[in-house]
Amino acid sequence: MTRDFANKSSATRGTAKKKPANASRRQQAPASTAPWPWFLAGLLCGVFLSGLVWLASQQPDATAEEAVVAQKSSEKPRPTPRFDFYTLLPEQRIDVDINPEAMANTSTPSDEFLLQAGSFKQAEDADRRRAQLLLLGLTANVEEATTDNGRWFRVYIGPFESRSALQSARNRTAQEGIDTLLLKRPAKPAG
């Protein structure tokens, strides 16, 4: 084997004793394992086993099925539902503020029916309500009235040609949350 004497580092390297890779492990003392992981593992196993023993010693008073059966037997039997509204409703009478028959009997051909949709102190408020009614497809007019309480601007819908048109207008305003008042007044003379 030839040596390179020019390079001192390789010469010293070659003469030096090589240590095996496992030598550092052999020289160290064997690592002692810490006892606390084993202690925790044993403790957990002990707790688990004691829980199992405790559960096995617990005997229920009655099973769930027996409890349900006992409860059902102690309850009174449920009464069958009664549907009395079939007989009660035809016997009931509902009073409505508009009676179509009375409206037809009391009106003369010269009477007209209107719905008042509001009475306002300010003309702008009355115009706003009129615009709201126009958007609903209803013909609305604003009339000025002077009373003991001052000047008022009243919004009227109508006059209506039929009761069905009147009721349709009242339903539309009710859906929008506008309260109306049914008015009957003599028809204005043509001209």
Image: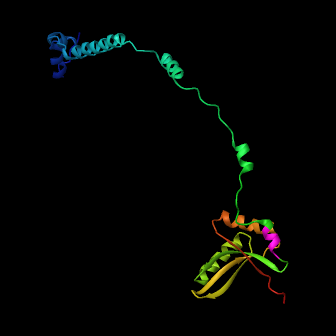
Give the residues drawn in magenta, as a range: 102-107
Q: Is 21 left, or right, of 102 in this rendering?
A: left
Please give the name of the residue rendered at 66% of the width and 86% of the height, measured from the top-left corner: 144
Is 18 situated above or below 103? above
Q: Looking at the image, which is closer to me, 114 or 21?
A: 114
Q: Position of residue 124 (x, y in %)?
A: 60, 82
Q: Looking at the image, which is closer to me, 106 or 71?
A: 106
Asked if residue 104 is among those painted magenta in the image, a careful observer would answer yes
Asked if residue 30 is among those painted magenta in the image, a careful observer would answer no
- Picture quarter with the C terminus: bottom right
Image quarter of residue 93: bottom right
Q: Is 74 left, or right, of 41 in this rendering?
A: right
Is 97 situated above or below 156? above
Please give the name of the residue rendered at 44% of the width and 15% of the height, measured from the top-left corner: 62
Q: Position of residue 65 (x, y in %)?
A: 50, 17
Q: Main secondary structure of the magenta part?
A: helix
Is 110 situated above or below 173? below
- Picture quarter with the N terminus: top left
Tell me if I can see residue 132 in this picture: yes
